[in-house]
Image (cartoon, rainbow, N blue to C red):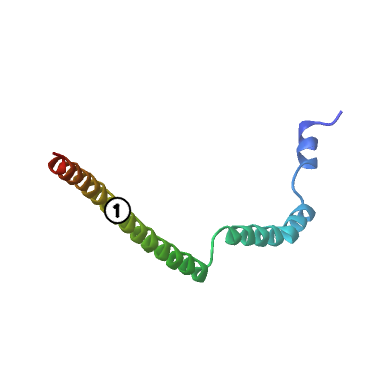
Amino acid sequence: MPTKTGDQTAQKVSFTHLDNFLKFAPIVGLAIIAYLQSLFPSKAEFEKMHATMHKIEKQIITLTTLQNKVDDHSRRLDILTTKIQALEIQIVKQNKP
């Protein structure tokens, strides 16, 4: 039956284990770095996305302004239509004997 000191020496990290680890560590590190770089856009892509988002924001502001003006004009037309109808009713009442 092996002793505890014999088990510990059998489980120690040897130079061979370290050598094998050092062979694969740079490859794994480069793979991790490549993956992390793929998650984020480059500076040029970021600037392009920023410019595109800025243009879209301007278009949204323009469309919102136009929509508000259309709504305002629609309300004014409704008021004018109501006033014209009221005037037509008054004209008809005055022309009747």
Q: Position of residue 16 (x, y in %)?
A: 79, 55
In the displayed image of the protein, which residue is found farthest to the right?
Answer: 1
Q: Nearer the viewer, residue 58 or 76?
A: 76
- Horizontal side, residue 9 vs residue 52: left or right: right
Q: Residue at x 79, y 36 (%)?
A: 7
Q: Nearer the viewer, residue 94 or 83?
A: 94
Q: Position of residue 61 (x, y in %)?
A: 34, 59
Q: Residue at x 24, y 48 (%)?
A: 81
Q: Position of residue 22 (x, y in %)?
A: 72, 59
Q: Quadrant of the N terminus?
A: top right
In the displayed image of the protein, which residue is found farthest to the top?
Answer: 1
In the displayed image of the protein, which residue is found farthest to the front?
Answer: 97
Tag 1: residue type? Answer: Asn
Q: Determine which residue is flagged by label 1.
A: 68
Q: Quadrant of residue 93?
A: top left
- Horizontal side, residue 35 vs residue 3: left or right: left
Q: Quadrant of residue 73?
A: bottom left
- Horizontal side, residue 90 vs residue 2: left or right: left
- Horizontal side, residue 51 vs residue 68: left or right: right
Q: Is residue 84 above or below residue 7?
A: below
Q: Quadrant of the C terminus?
A: top left
Q: Quadrant of residue 90?
A: top left
| Element carrying mark 1 | helix
Q: Count of labels shown? A: 1
Q: Is residue 86 above or below residue 71?
A: above
Q: Residue at x 75, y 38 (%)?
A: 8
Q: Residue at x 46, y 69 (%)?
A: 47
Give the crowd class for mark 1: few <14, some 14-19, many >=20 residues within 10 Å. Answer: few
Q: Is residue 1 above or below residue 60?
A: above
